[in-house]
């Protein structure tokens, strides 16, 4: 694993870590979720937030497909939780919200870390919410977790149920102590992403924490190949992308909001600059995970649960066009990901991590 970091270490928020942890802090005294473009809040744990690029022609996302790589997908959750400032929330009575909870894998980590907190998991996908609710561990104990379908662009904390996670009582309008988001915000278009984060941060009381991570792989071979293959002319799938083609290689992001590819993630500098006017500190870092997989077929299976879905769901299932696209995509991946000494391949997966503390 490699990490790139920005800023200057702030000792009050230091945590031991295999990466080089960097905190950016404000100077002292500074104040200041598709053919029809179906709009749906979820994560690489499932679906796209409202206002994002949702899978065309698909009503829901597959928890089972996502969970094929449960351990690898949950590792960033543990890494993000490990870097939360200490103590990040009150010892008891704290309110925690998992934005884009997917099938509940991130929520389970949060519950283990904060067993006495009132935790709510939100996701736009019915399949994801049903899978999360079905986990026995979420129903047991004094503070059961509650799960709800929600639209990230319109959701606000005052929609939380009284008593939050079932711990009894509570103020509906109590500020959220910790917003946690694992691989959801990258689904938002650029013009919605930062404003949504800032809007939620501003609902928090001083000391409230907004922690999130997003895949930062728009330019990675796995995702560039999706766009490249979709744009090949004269193929069985070509008509599916004629009206709203993906971004073209070498031309950056297309301005078409209906295109199947997502917008690239902001740079660490841009994310920091957007959040620091509202925050006492902003911790920004990037980690590139090196996932060793059996071969290109497994890379296809990985992205079928996330970024490839908006492409696949534009292609009709009948007639063989979708299978032809998948075959061509896998062949391209075999060219881009040469085998290791044992025949396996390495899938690079950069992610942007941010922990912002409300001022």
Image (tube, helix red, strand yellow):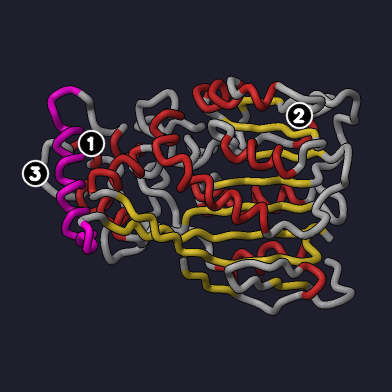
Would residue 217 appear left or right of 45 to someone viewing this image?
A: left
Q: Quadrant of residue 174?
A: top right
| Residue 43 picture location, percent across and down | 52, 40
Q: Secondary structure at mark 2?
A: helix
* Farthest-out residue, left: 234
Residue underneath mark 3: 234
| Residue 284 picture location, percent across and down | 63, 66
Residue 339 is covered by the magenta coloring? yes
Q: Residues at badges 1 and 2 in contact (C-beta under 8 Å)? A: no
Q: CA distance from mark 1 to mark 2?
A: 38 Å
**N-terminal-most mark, 3 or 1:** 3
Q: Residues at badges 2 and 3 in contact (C-beta under 8 Å)? A: no
Q: Is residue 301 above or below residue 319?
A: below
Q: Is residue 150 above or below residue 261?
A: above
Observer-side mark, 2 or 3, equals: 2
Q: Quadrant of residue 356?
A: bottom right
**N-terminal-most mark, 1 or 2:** 2
Residue underneath mark 1: 240
Local crowd at mark 2 within 10 Å, few (<14), some, or many (≥20)? Answer: few
Residue 334 is covered by the magenta coloring? yes
Local crowd at mark 1 within 10 Å, few (<14), some, or many (≥20)? Answer: many
Residue underneath mark 2: 159
| Number of marks in picture | 3
Residue at position x 20%, y 56% in the image: 343
Q: CA distance from mark 2 to mark 3?
A: 49 Å
Local crowd at mark 3 within 10 Å, few (<14), some, or many (≥20)? Answer: few
């Amino acid at each position: 694993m490699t990490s790139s970091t920005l800023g200057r270490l702030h000792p009050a928020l230091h945590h031991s870590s295999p990466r080089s942890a960097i905190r950016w802090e404000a100077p002292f005294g500074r104040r200041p979720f598709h053919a029809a473009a179906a709009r749906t809040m979820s994560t690489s744990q499932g679906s796209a937030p409202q206002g994002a690029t949702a899978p065309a022609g698909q009503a829901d996302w597959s928890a089972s497909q996502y969970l094929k790589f449960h351990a690898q997908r949950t590792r960033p959750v543990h890494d993000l939780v490990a870097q939360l400032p200490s103590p990040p929330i009150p010892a008891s009575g704290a309110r925690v919200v998992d934005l884009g909870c997917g099938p509940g894998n991130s929520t389970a980590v949060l519950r283990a870390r904060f067993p006495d907190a009132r935790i709510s998991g939100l996701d736009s996908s019915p399949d994801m919410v049903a899978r999360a609710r079905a986990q026995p561990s979420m129903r047991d104990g004094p503070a059961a977790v509650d799960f709800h379908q929600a639209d990230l662009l319109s959701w606000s904390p005052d929609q939380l149920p009284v008593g939050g996670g079932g711990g009894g009582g509570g103020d509906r309008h109590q500020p959220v102590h910790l917003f946690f988001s694992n691989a959801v915000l990258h689904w938002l278009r650029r013009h919605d992403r930062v404003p949504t984060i800032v809007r939620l941060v501003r609902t928090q009381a001083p000391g409230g924490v907004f922690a999130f991570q997003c895949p930062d792989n728009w330019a990675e071979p796995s995702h560039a190949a999706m766009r490249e293959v979709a744009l090949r002319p004269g193929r069985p799938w070509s008509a599916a992308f004629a009206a709203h083609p993906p971004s073209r290689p070498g031309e950056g992001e297309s301005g078409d909001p209906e295109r199947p590819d997502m917008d690239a993630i902001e740079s660490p500098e841009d994310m920091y600059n957007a959040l620091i006017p509202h925050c006492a500190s902003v911790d920004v870092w990037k980690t590139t995970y090196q996932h060793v997989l059996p071969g290109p077929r497994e890379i296809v299976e990985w992205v079928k649960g996330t970024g490839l879905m908006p492409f696949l769901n534009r292609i009709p299932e009948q007639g063989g066009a979708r299978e032809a696209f998948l075959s061509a995509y896998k062949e391209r991946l075999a060219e881009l990901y040469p085998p290791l000494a044992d025949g396996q391949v390495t899938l690079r997966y950069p992610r942007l991590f941010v922990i912002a503390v409300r001022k």
